[in-house]
Amino acid sequence: MRFCHVSTFYPPWNFGGDGIAIQMICEALARRGHQVDVVHCADAYGLRGRQAVSAAIDPPGVHRHTLHSRLGALSPIITQQTGRPGLKHDRISEILSNSYDVVHFHNISLVGGPGVMALSQAPVTLYTTHDHWLVCPAHVLWKNKSKPCDKPSCFSCSIRSGFPPQMWRYTGLLQRSLRHVDALLCPSDFAAQRHRSAGINCDIHVHRWFSRMGSAPRDTEETPTESATDSAPLFVYAGRLVVSKGVEHLLEVFAQRPEYRLDVAGDGPLRGVLQSRYEGFPQIRFLGETAGPELERLFRRARAVVVPSWGPEVSPLTVLEALACGAPVIVRRAGGSAEAVELAGGGLIYERPEELLPLVDRLAKDAALNKTLSIQAERGSSEHFSEEIWMKRYFSIIEQIAHDKSAVLE
């Protein structure tokens, strides 16, 4: 089959987990013999002040279309404001005019807005809700850059959150565009319910992520470069360093426990401030952006991976990656963040901030519990979040849509 995946970000022009998840899907499809095209916007990556990325090498079967405009950042800005592909319209139309069996949209906020969905000519058109962008201009239901969204006040929240208000959201553009989509795929029950309650009336399927981590053997040996203090229990945070992720409270917790270690893997606007604030705490290390085998080795050595999000997550890929590596997870219930642990086991769930430190202490001191959760994590990952399970569900949805459409035409 021929697939085309459309996303604002795609590695290495990427921020956060959505691009990584899309890359996993595309490469898994290619390994199964399918032809996969990827469309993404390099100009959008540059909006955050990042330097241009050198050409990426993709595996056989994956062909990328990296969109550039001679006007640079103006192109995604036009898309953000109009909700349409704008300067990218002709090129995307040309690509999507190819005979694809499936066109799959992901984070399209800056690569075409809702208007790009009408350009699909494929028999099956899908959209995955990596975030809450369809119902939230700020993407994350994090209101006024300070708290989870309790009720819509999108215009003022956009201004306070640093997003130019989008007047197209007050027209029928979004609903008209969604008519061109056969199904929404949501990685959690929470995301599916949140979109339904917001009036998104597409056919919605819960389709949880998978992780490509977990294939390497567990490495329990310390590396020669580590110091003697590294025998202390290691905990890991992996994600963006932003307020909604709860990383500030996490650091406050570990500042109280010099006998534990915390490795913070990730980057974001808070990194400089937090590094300065905790430079006197040797048990806390800031590793910067960490991915691939390096992150997997870190997870495998961790007593637990902590996911302390305050904002209502769709479904953090970090949770699935940790489970696949046999790392117990301590996760705060926020949106769909805890659903994977509830389904697969392998972790501990908390709700109130004061509950985090006792759970950290428990896993640091209870070796038997840690071992039990580690076994549950790997078993639950293989039973619920494997690549094979994801693919089987994916093609089942595609085949059902194609069948229903052909029945209508008969």
Image (cartoon, helix red, strand yellow):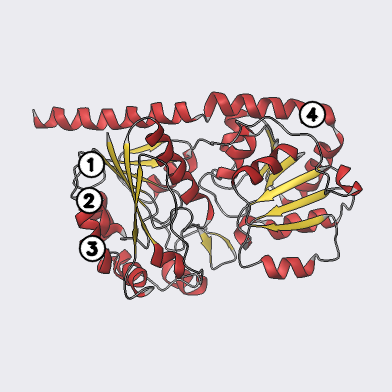
Circle count: 4
Among numbered discs 2 and 4, the one appearing first in the sequence:
2
Crowd tier of the residue under label 1, counting other residues whose Cα lies within 10 Å: few below 14, some 14–19, many 20 or above:
many
**How far apart in space, not on screen, are marks 2 and 1 (Cα)?**
8 Å
* Residue occupied by mark 4: 369
Among numbered discs 1 and 4, the one appearing first in the sequence:
1
Element at badge 4? helix
> Which amino acid, mark 3?
His
* Residue occupied by mark 2: 96
Quarter holding the C terminus is top left
The mark found on residue 100 in the picture is 1
> Which amino acid, mark 1?
Tyr
In-image side of 386 versus 224 (left or right): left
Crowd tier of the residue under label 3, counting other residues whose Cα lies within 10 Å: few below 14, some 14–19, many 20 or above:
some
* Residue occupied by mark 3: 89
Q: Position of residue 184 (x, y in %)?
A: 34, 42
Among numbered discs 4 and 3, the one appearing first in the sequence:
3
**How far apart in space, not on screen, are marks 4 and 3 (Cα)?**
55 Å
**How far apart in space, not on screen, are marks 1 and 4 (Cα)?**
49 Å
Q: Position of residue 327 (x, y in %)?
A: 69, 35
